[in-house]
Image (tube, grey):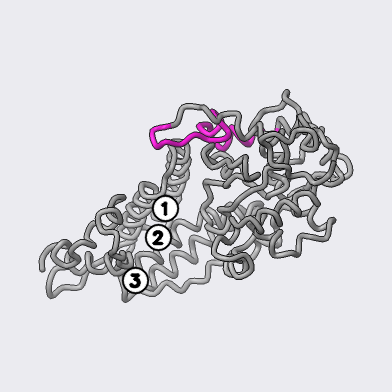
Amino acid sequence: METIEDALGIHANQDHPDWSKVYPTAEKLPEALVSAVNELLKAPKGHDTFHLFSDAVDRYKVYRNKKITTSVKSDGQLKKLNRELAKDLKRLDDFIAFNGNQEFTSDNCNVALRRYKDHLVERHKSSPATAKRDLAPSAAAMRKYAEEVALSVTVTAKLTINEQRANAKQRPVADVETELLMLWAAAHDDSYDQFFRLHVFGIFSGSHASELMQTDVQHVHADQGYFVLGGTKRSHRTRPVVIVNDSHKKLLNEFKNATKDSMGFASVCGFRAAQTESAHTALMKRQLFKATGNPKLTAYSLRHTGNHLGDIKGISNLPQFSRMFGWRAIESHIQSDYGKAGIYSNTMITEYRRLTDTLIEDLPDYSRPAPAVSQNNVTSINSRS
């Protein structure tokens, strides 16, 4: 056997998007196995392969590009992922520039990663989270290469940045007695940006801006009273989100008839989905200040305000609340309690509605028209009349 096709047969091209359609009954081989076979075929017979740090970096770049190609679902998401990749590639180049392109051995890898970690901690004294973010691509590239190619190399360096938790910024939450009322009013005010208003409604589900941006208009199930949050990196954060009231429903459907991109996607946030994260951050800061006058509030403040409100209401400790906010994966528990449909079962959606009603029970009913009045073609979510 001299080629990958000879060695793996139909599995040689299993990363192709249509592979599962062509071979519907076949199961894909583990990526690590395919990679190992590839390396064995490329290695000269009778000689050990000589590996460099740059080999690990190059392989990681290919892996990340392939991951983007096979997972992207919209033009906006593609741009976002490519921006993230460009930043990580600069971090990988910095790692090589700092340590030099050394031979890929256990000792060299572990020492280089530890030295680079210390260097980043020193560089970012006031922001340990930034140090951790800058370190992550290099650590991932080294470990992945050791696990899949240079099997004799073991990367065991302890790379925890201990200062991160101690120095982590305390994100301010909105004052539930005053600022939450202001934000709630803004969510129902047409003079505010549609994306901002959707984000305010996201208080009651822990929704991220990026998740809202990647939510497809096709996944708004208004007749069933929920939509499916999109664009998340973690499977447990893909979940149904309750449509709070008619105003929320109107915002979600504002771009229902918008032109779809080349991948057949149209965001509930419309044109905002094509903008950069920095543009979104600036917009949120302006709108938050306009609504509350508090310059310290950020987009993250909204998400944590929802959890804080859950604490006050005494429901944040419930597993259903944690799943509604996407805090942790408890799918096995949910499926046991609610059957095969799991979080999408009618019983679970009803539970989410009950929890949402509890969160908003003390807020004024600004919905236009109010759920108690408009019963035609609208799923009543707010149980208050």
Q: Secondary structure at mark 1?
A: helix
- Which residue in the structure is indicated by mark 3? 105
Q: Secondary structure at mark 3?
A: loop
Give the number of the disc on residue 92. Answer: 1
Label located before the other in sequence (1 or 2): 1
Pointers 1 and 2 in contact (CB under 8 A)?
A: yes
Image quadrant in which you'd find residue 209? top right
Q: Is residue 49 above or below residue 294?
A: below
Q: Can see residue 122? A: no
For this view, does 9 lie left or right of residue 226?
left
Spot occupied by residue 142 in the image (x, y as percentages of width and height): 39, 64
The residues bearing labels 3 and 2 have C-alpha atoms spaced at a distance of 14 Å
Task: State the quadrant of the N terminus.
Answer: bottom left
Residue at 58%, 35% (x, y): give it: 278
Spot occupied by residue 355 in the image (x, y as percentages of width and height): 75, 54
What count of labels does the image hold? 3
User: What's under tag 2, amino acid-wise?
Assistant: Ala
User: What's under tag 1, amino acid-wise?
Assistant: Leu
Label located before the other in sequence (3 or 2): 3
- Which residue in the structure is indicated by mark 2? 141
Image quadrant in which you'd find residue 375? top right
Spot occupied by residue 294 in the image (x, y as percentages of width and height): 80, 36
For this view, does 140 lie left or right of residue 12?
right
- 261 or 305, which is in the foreground? 261
Magenta region, residue range: 261-285
User: What's under tag 3, amino acid-wise?
Assistant: Thr
The residues bearing labels 1 and 2 have C-alpha atoms spaced at a distance of 9 Å
